[in-house]
Structures are given as structure tokens and as C-alpha cells.
Image (tube, rainbow, N blue to C red):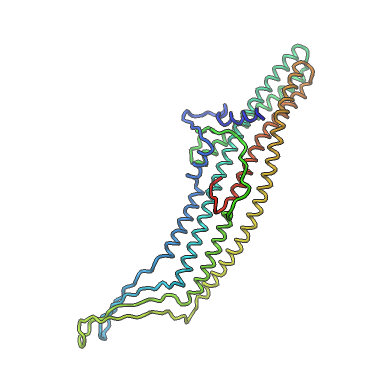
Amino acid sequence: MQNVKSLAAAGAMVLLAAAVLPAQERALSRTDVIAAVVARGPRLALAKSDSAFAEAGVALARQFENPVFGFQRTESTPTEHYTIDVPIDLPWLRSPRVGSANAALDAAVQRFAFERAAIAYTADTAYTRALVAAARAILSARSARDADSVLVLARVRRDAGDASELDVQLAAVSAGQLANAAAIDALEATSTVLTLQALMGMPTRAPTVRLADSLSTPAALAASRDGTPLMIAAAEADARATELALALEKRRWLPGIALSAGWESGDPGGTGAKLLPSWGLAFPLPLFNRNGPAILAASAQRDRAAALLTVARIEQDAALARAQRALVVSRERQARSGALVAGAQRVAELSLLAYREGAAALPSVLEAQRIARDAQMQYLEDVAALRSASGLVQLLTMTTNNRTAP
């Protein structure tokens, strides 16, 4: 296990020999990468725009309508009429309108917090994959060098009469296969770094960063968290918004009451140019409709929001259950594979020693080296899977009382 950890650390500090690195490369930690992706990611910009739109909706719901100035000239006296109509924002209309807008804003805030955490989780996973790819590339390069050493040893033993040409050809085939695998792993390591740069909004023509952190197992998660999961809280806020919107539409059968104040002038046979004050109230008459279609539409939106809330709760429970099961399995696999690494590496060393002394056949040496290599690579993959599962559980268990990104 120690050998694999040292490989992971080396993979974090060194890019592969096959990749040509510019002199201006920067060492970035996991925290640096997450911060950069969160700050520059286009997905977060979309979430911010949704929040800004919801804030504008609250401002729109709170604003008062402007008064209307009117002028009318008639042939009858008084000939000039001036009015100012002031719309009255009735409390039983204003309250649900503002409440619905506030609920929509709350839903946008919860979705923004979840989206930010999801982006951080994506960046964290990409950083882990880059670490694993770099460590795999170094391990593959080391295995290729070891295979070359075995090939040289097979040739020496053949020339000394202790081995056959079959051993040499078998060692040559193994060395060629491992060299190809090393080239593929080198390309994969470079690709993961470029993917990471793309997430950070950096150019991707060539690797310009190196990974400063090492691959490590994640810390244990808290047993439980108080509060409502973010996506369920957002769905609940949407449901509240539609309920209040329906209440608003039901009360709008008599909207538009306005207070009218003004004056009249221009009575040559009577008051002359004297200003005559006037006032009144304007009421709409619900003769042709009582806002029925709008009520039906709001009712349908209310029912849809309630259905989406139910779906969100079901999907949240199912996703969290899957993630928690994956976390348990990943932790068990990581512990098991970590325990096998040292033993497999010891078997490979002993088999090579036995072959060097003529006490073992070459196929058993190659098989032991393959098993040791697979055990080391499996450990790397299991650590990455454990980090991914842990991050996903942390993401799904984020609540309204704890919005810290994973």
C-alpha cells in the first residue's frame, strides 16, 4: 500500500515524461481547482441568472403602480377636466403576490446553493481522476522498465544456457505490451489535466498546471445533518409559490380599484376660470369574466408543483440510498485492495528472485508481476471510487442549514 501511495504522491507532483510542459506551469491544490471552477464555471452563471431573475420578481411584486394623469376638454361647461388616477394596491392582493415572489426567490436560492455544491463535486472528482491517471502512468512506466529488465535477464540466462528462446520471446512480448500500456496511460494522464484546465476556463492546447495534492482517502462523514435537503427545499418553495399564486388569482375577480382626484375649469357663464375640485373611485365590473381562466391555469401550476415535490422526495431518497450503499461498498473495497497490495508486491519480488536463481519459470514471474500491478491499479481506482461516493453522499445530504460545498 505504501508503494501505491508514493506513486499517487509522485503522480500529483510530476506530469508524465511523454507530456511536454511549459515553463510557466503552476502547482494547484484541490482547493485551488475547486475555487477556480466554481468562480468561472458557466453552470454557476446560469444559476446566478435564475436567482437574479427571482430577485427581480420580488422587486416587481413589491412595487406600486404609477398614477395616471388625465386631461379632457368638452364643449359643455366646465370645458376642461384634469384628473390623477392612483391605483390602490389592496392588501389581500399585495400579500399573496409578494409572498409568491418571495417563495420563488427562496427556491432559486436553494437551487443556486445545490448547483454550486454540484460544481464543486464535479471539480473534486475531476481532480481525483487526474491524480489517479498520473499515478497509473507512473506505475505503467515503472512496469515497462521492469519488463525490460526481465527481458535482459531472460537473454542473459539464455546465453548462459539456463533459459530457452521461448522465455526470451515471452519476455519480449510482455515488455512490448507494457510499453504500449504505458503510452496509453501517459496520454490519459495528459487528457485528464487538460480536462481539468477546461473546467477552470483555462486554455487546453497543452498542460499548464501540475497537481499539488496527493491521492488520499476522504475523511469520515458526519452521521446526520439537520434541515431539509436543498432540492427538496427548492421544490417545497415552488409549491408555496404556486399556492400563493392561486390564492392571488382567486382574489383578482375585483382588481384595479383606483382613487381619482382632480379639478375642472373653464365655465365662462358661471365660475369662469375658477378651479373646481373633483374626486371619485373607479371599480371594474366583473360582467364578462371573473378571472376563471387564470384561476384554472394557476390551479394546474399548483398541482404540477405538488407532483414535482413528490417526485423530488422520491428521487432524493432513492439517490441517497444508492449513494450510501456505494459508499459502504467502496470503503470495503478500498480497505481490501489496500491490504492486498503489499502481499502482491512481495510475491512479485520473490518470484523474480526465484527466476534469477533458476528456481522458477518465467511465466510465473510475469503472472506475479501482473497481479501486483493490477492490485496497485485497483487500489488507486478504489480510492478514487471512495472519494467520489463520499462526495456524492455529502452533496445529497446538504441541507438548508448547511450549504458548504463538498
Residue at (63, 58) in percent of width and height: 313
Q: Taking 80 as reference, is 135 left or right?
A: right
**The residue positioned farthest toward the top in the image shown:** 160
Q: Taking 266 as reference, is 280 left or right?
A: right
Quarter of the image where the C terminus is located: top right
Q: How many marks?
A: 0
Quarter of the image where the N terminus is located: top right
Is 396 located above or below residue 249 in the figure? above
Residue in the foreground of this view, choosing between 371 and 323? 323
Q: Taking 145 as reference, is 118 left or right?
A: left
Residue at (67, 27) in percent of width and height: 178
Is 265 located above or below residue 41 in the figure? below
Whether residue 224 is visible, yes or no, is: yes
Residue at (48, 63) in percent of width and height: 101
Q: Quadrant of residue 70?
A: bottom left
Q: Position of residue 153 (x, y in %)?
A: 71, 17
Q: Position of residue 57 (x, y in %)?
A: 45, 61
Q: Position of residue 115 (x, y in %)?
A: 54, 50
Whether residue 188 is visible, yes or no, is: no
Is 194 located above or below residue 227 in the figure? above
Q: Position of residue 61 (x, y in %)?
A: 44, 65
**The residue positioned farthest toward the bottom in the image shown:** 269
